[in-house]
Image (cartoon, helix red, strand yellow):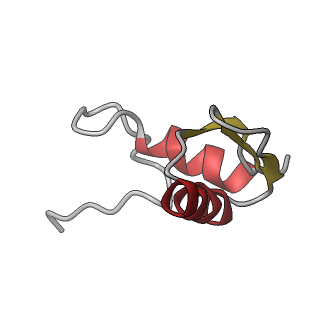
Amino acid sequence: MATSVTVACADCPYTEVYDSLRVARTALDEHEQATGHRVDWQIGRLSTGVERAGSDAGVCGLDDCNPESPLVHDWDE
């Protein structure tokens, strides 16, 4: 599954779909700065690797992460 992020302006017809969170965020910032408009984004889906990393990490600050994940580091070692 690939990443899909829609950036849409509330003040003009600007709407664009991106396949990268970084590129979408950059476009959002650039449109807001250039126009002063209110721009929002909606993340439709994320790539499999990003979804796995999020699932493995659990909720920030809680102990519900996946300890078997290669993405989790035990800082106490």
The residue at 63%/52% (across/down) is 50
- Front residue of 22/77: it is 22
- Front residue of 19/69: it is 19
The residue at 39%/57% (across/down) is 72
In screen coordinates, is 18 left or right of 30?
A: right
Q: Quadrant of residue 76?
A: bottom left
Residue at the far left in the pictured view: 76
The residue at 52%/59% (across/down) is 29
In screen coordinates, is 70 left or right of 27?
A: left
In screen coordinates, is 39 left or right of 66?
A: right
In screen coordinates, is 66 left or right of 12?
A: left
- Residue 41 sits above or below residue 36 on the image: above
The residue at 44%/41% (across/down) is 66
Q: Quadrant of residue 58?
A: top left
- Front residue of 21/11: it is 11
- Front residue of 6/76: it is 6
Where does residue 42 sit, x and y in percent of width and height? 65, 35
Q: Quadrant of the C terminus?
A: bottom left
- Residue 59 sits above or below residue 14 on the image: above
- Residue 5 sits above or below residue 11 on the image: below
Where does residue 71 sit, x and y in percent of width and height? 47, 60
Where does residue 69 sit, x and y in percent of width and height? 49, 52
Q: How many marks?
A: 0
Where does residue 10 sit, x and y in percent of width and height? 63, 31
